[in-house]
C-alpha cells in the first residue's frame, strides 16, 4: 500500500500497517537555520544505523544484501536499488518517512555521484554529491521557485553561481564562499547587465558600479541603499561599451578544508517564500 506522492509525504510501503514498528526515531529539534535544520537524520538512516526489517534480493556469502534488491527498515524507510556488502552502492531510490526522497548514485551507504534529492518543503537539488553532502556542480530549485545553479562545496554554495529570482526574473551572478555571497556581482534583467559589489548583505556604495546597456553603452555611477530597502542610483558618466572598462567579474574561490557533515537540508532562498 502506498500513499499519494507529494512533497513531505512518504512514498514507500506503509510499514505501520504491514509491520507495526516501535522505537522510530523522531527528528531532533536543533537551534539551526532552515538550511541546516534537517541535516541530522537523513544520512544516519543511509549509513545503516537503523536496522533492516525486510529484504528481498540476492545476498553474499556473509548473508549481506548484495546486488539489486528492495529493503525496508525499522524506521519506515524504503530503498530499492543496488547493494554491496550490505550497504547502498550504485544506483538506487531511497524514500524516507521523513519526506525526503533521493534517486541517484550511492557509495558505501552514502549519496555519492550524481543524484536528485527532493526535500519535504518541495525544494529539489539535482547535482553532484560526495560522502552524503552536496559537492560539485548542482541546481537547487527552492520551494518559492527561486533557482540557484552553480558550484557547491561540502553542502554549501561555494564558488561561482547564478541565483534566479522567480518573482521578477532577475538573475544574480556572483561568488559564494561557504554559503555566503560576496564580492563582484552581475545582475541581469533583459538586455541590461549591472556590475557592482555585494558586501554580504546589500550592494556596496563604496565602489563605482556600471550599467551595461545591451553591450552598447556603459552608464557609470554610485548606488546607495535608501529608505525601505530601495536603491538610489546617481549616474556619473556614460561611455561607449568597452569590455576592458568593465568592473571585476565574479571570481572563483578556493575550496577550504572543512569537515564533512551529514545533510538532508533544504536551502533558504534569498527572499521570503
Image (spheres, rainbow, N blue to C red):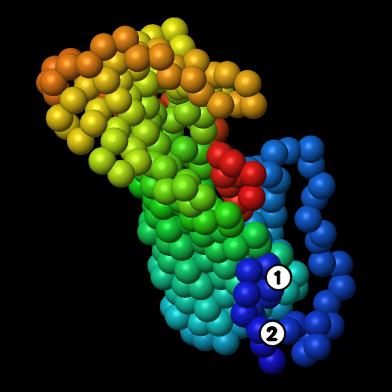
Lower position in the chain sequence, tag 2 or tag 1: 2
From the viewer's side, name the closer residue of 66 and 200: 200
Q: Is residue 92 above or below residue 181?
A: below
Residue on which the image places disc 2: 3
From the viewer's side, name the closer residue of 140 and 270: 270
Residue 48: image x %, image y %?
63, 62
Q: Is residue 198 left or right of residue 50?
A: left
Q: Quadrant of residue 52?
A: bottom right
From the viewer's side, name the closer residue of 199 and 232: 232
Question: Is residue 77 visible to us here?
Answer: no
User: Residue placed at 39% from the left, 41% from the top?
Assistant: 171
Residue 124: image x %, image y %?
51, 59
Residue on which the image places disc 1: 97
From the viewer's side, name the closer residue of 203 and 268: 203
Q: Is residue 217 above or below residue 266?
A: above
Question: Is residue 97 visible to us here?
Answer: yes
Q: Quadrant of residue 74?
A: bottom right
Q: Is residue 2 above or below residue 253?
A: below
Secondary structure type for disc 1: loop
Q: Is residue 242 above or below residue 28?
A: above
Amino acid at each position: 500500500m502506498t500513499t499519494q506522492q507529494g512533497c513531505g509525504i512518504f512514498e514507500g510501503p506503509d510499514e505501520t500497517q504491514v509491520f507495526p514498528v516501535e522505537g522510530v526515531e523522531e527528528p531532533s529539534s536543533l537551534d539551526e537555520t532552515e538550511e541546516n535544520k534537517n541535516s541530522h537524520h537523513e544520512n544516519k538512516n543511509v549509513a545503516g544505523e537503523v536496522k533492516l526489517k525486510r529484504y528481498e534480493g540476492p545476498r553474499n556469502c556473509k548473508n549481506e544484501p548484495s546486488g539489486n534488491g528492495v529493503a525496508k527498515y525499522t524506521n519506515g524507510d524504503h530503498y530499492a536499488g543496488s547493494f554491496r556488502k550490505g550497504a547502498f552502492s550504485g544506483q538506487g531510490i531511497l524514500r524516507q518517512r521523513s519526506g525526503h526522497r533521493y534517486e541517484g548514485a550511492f557509495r558505501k551507504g552514502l549519496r555519492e555521484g550524481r543524484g536528485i534529492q527532493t526535500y519535504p518543503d518541495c525544494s529539489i537539488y539535482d547535482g553532484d554529491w560526495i560522502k552524503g553532502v552536496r559537492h560539485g556542480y548542482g541546481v537547487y530549485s527552492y520551494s518559492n521557485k527561486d533557482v540557484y545553479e552553480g558550484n557547491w562545496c561540502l553542502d554549501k554554495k561555494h564558488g561561482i553561481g547564478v541565483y534566479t529570482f522567480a518573482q521578477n526574473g532577475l538573475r544574480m551572478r556572483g561568488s559564494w564562499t561557504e554559503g555566503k555571497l560576496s564580492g563582484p556581482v552581475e545582475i541581469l534583467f533583459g538586455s541590461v547587465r549591472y556590475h557592482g559589489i555585494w558586501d554580504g548583505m546589500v550592494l556596496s556604495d563604496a565602489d563605482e558600479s556600471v550599467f551595461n546597456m545591451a553591450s552598447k553603452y556603459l552608464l557609470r555611477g554610485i548606488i546607495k541603499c535608501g529608505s525601505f530597502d530601495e536603491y538610489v542610483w546617481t549616474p556619473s558618466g556614460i561611455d561607449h561599451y568597452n569590455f576592458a572598462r568593465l568592473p571585476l567579474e565574479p571570481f572563483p574561490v578556493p575550496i577550504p578544508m572543512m569537515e564533512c557533515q551529514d545533510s538532508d537540508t533544504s536551502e533558504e532562498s534569498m527572499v521570503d517564500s
